[in-house]
Amino acid sequence: MKSRYVITLAALCSTWSLSAYADRDTGWEFGGDLIYQNSQDIEFEGDSTVSTDSDLGFAFTFAYRFNAHLELQMGVDWQTVDYNAQIAPGTGNAGLAIGIDGEYEAITPRVGIAYNFIDGPITPFLTGVIGYSFIDTNIPDGPPTVGCWWDPWYGEVCTAWQETRSVDEFMYGVGAGVRWDATDTLSVKLGYEKHWLDFSQADSGSDFDQFKLGLSFSY
């Protein structure tokens, strides 16, 4: 008989704990994501190729909940990714492709919509996102430049820097995942997103698979 009461009490406590944080009312959220991006091979016009490594990144996120289901999401993704490029010789030029190893940095402001299917604390969701990626390839775009200036503490300082090639492209994507409202202020999200970058010279492979683990705080 005692075991029956214990089981009943445990079931009631479990039900209460799940329902305690089931109400996602109107409000703001902020937080961050850990991003894992899969490797990808991109083919460009003229048979040049770029192979990117799998790598980690981070995101700062904001969201506004209209109700328990619909929310407007905003954020900025930051990634540094190692790559290997094979640059094919131009038309009429003999020779082999030139190999370049480097690391590119990508900063992507984005906005999107998320739809949570269930009112309760654990719910699957779908997302749609658009943004703009600013990519610094770290490939030199000219000879080094040396400049000097007067520092208020160290006096005259001279250093060299080098311009690098950058690419700015439109991004769009879709995703799915699971959200858990652990408390009335803390939520955990695990999701997958497919992003496409609108590289004008790419023949194939300008899509990227991302897995995200995020924490958000409501207020």
Image (tube, grey):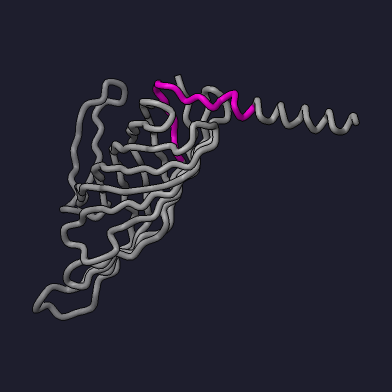
Q: What residue is rendered at 31% in x and 26% in y?
A: 154
| Residue 100 image-quadrant placement | bottom left
Check the picture and name the quadrant holding the N terminus. Answer: top right
Q: Is residue 19 magenta?
A: yes
Q: Is residue 94 above or below residue 188?
A: below
Between 69 and 107, the residue placed more toward the observer is: 69
Residue at position x 12%, y 77% from top? Answer: 93
The one nearer the camera, 4 or 43, is 4
Give whichever of 199, 6 is nearer the camera: 6
Give x and y (percent) for residue 10.
Answer: 76, 30
Which residue appears at 19% of the width and 34% of the height? 148
**Residue 164 image point, x, y percent:** 21, 50
96 vs 109, nearest the viewer = 109
Q: Is 59 colored magenta in this rendering?
A: no
Position of the C terminus by quadrant: top left
Residue 177, percent across and down?
A: 46, 45
Relative to residue 75, is residue 92 drawn left or right? left
| Stretch in magenta | 17-33
